[in-house]
Image (cartoon, rainbow, N blue to C red):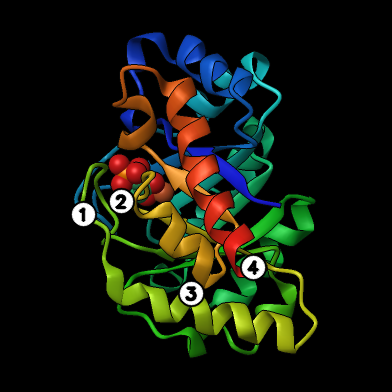
Amino acid sequence: MLKIAPSILSADFAHLAQSVQKVEQAGAEYLHIDVMDGHFVPNITLGPLLVKALRPHSKMFFDVHLMIEQPERYIDDFVQAGADLICIHAEACTHLHRCVTQIKETGAKVGVALNPHTPLNVIQYILPLLDLVLLMTVNPGFGGQKFIPQVLPKIDELSRLIKQNGLTAEIEVDGGINAETAPLVARAGARVLVAGSAVFGAPDPAQAVHDIRRAAEQATAAIC
Ligand SMILES: O=C(CO)[C@@H](O)[C@H](O)COP(=O)(O)O
Ligand SMILES: [Fe+2]
């Protein structure tokens, strides 16, 4: 089943709880929370305190995307704050397997994110441990960037790898996803679609969630 994950990076931070409730009522399954440290990426966003503040306002699955160096320092804090899944960047971890294991031991789900240029083989041997692989379709750091189409064959390759090996990891895509690009990534095999500016920058965020889902579902229905 296809899941829509609005990214709060493009939401109105002064009215965050209301913005989150709008997309939850529209049926979005995941809430994508972008954490940036000003080192791994040039931008700085938010920390566990904000996740904790939002938690009582939503039953959505909190998908926390850590764009931070040495994420092992903050995993426990984000899980205690209410994260359901922690996604770390392969490029930000010297000991990726150790970080993945640390997340699993908290009881949270675990994801690994790959930048557009990073090959799939960096996660080849730990793929069976993962609940989710996040393929970045922009260079991380900012919302509102243009989709990078060169990632499409990578989505397709990962999708085949997961199927061929009988694995269960979900493929998430993040960056430049809207009703035009959603069909492309869904056709390639992505099943969790992050959308920030296309949802929270739209005049009607609830309608935007429906439009992205419909566009992706029509594309996958056409394959079957
Ligand atoms: O992780 C990131 C950016 O680094 C994303 O989650 C963005 O928030 C997506 O924003 P849009 O490209 O959908 O506007
Ligand atoms: Fe993200």
Q: CA distance from mark 4 to mark 2?
A: 27 Å
Residue 146, numbered label: 1
Residue 184 screen position, x and y as percent: 42, 63
Q: CA distance from mark 2 to mark 3?
A: 15 Å
| Residue sitting farthest toward the front | 222
Residue 176, numbered label: 2
Q: Residue at position x 36%, y 80% from top?
A: 118
Q: In terms of secondary structure, where does tag 2 sit?
A: loop
Residue 100, numbered label: 4
Depth order, front residue of 82/185: 185
Q: CA distance from mark 4 to mark 1?
A: 30 Å
Q: Is mark 2 within 8 Å of ligand 1?
A: yes
Q: In terms of secondary structure, where does tag 1 sit?
A: loop
Q: Amino acid at mark 4?
A: Val
Q: Residues within 10 Å of mark 2 (few under 14, many from 20)?
A: many
Labels 3 and 1: the sequence-earlier one: 1
Q: Residue at position x 52%, y 58% from top?
A: 219
Q: Which residue is mark 3?
A: 155
- Callouts 2 and 3 close, C-beta under 8 Å: no
Labels 4 and 3: the sequence-earlier one: 4
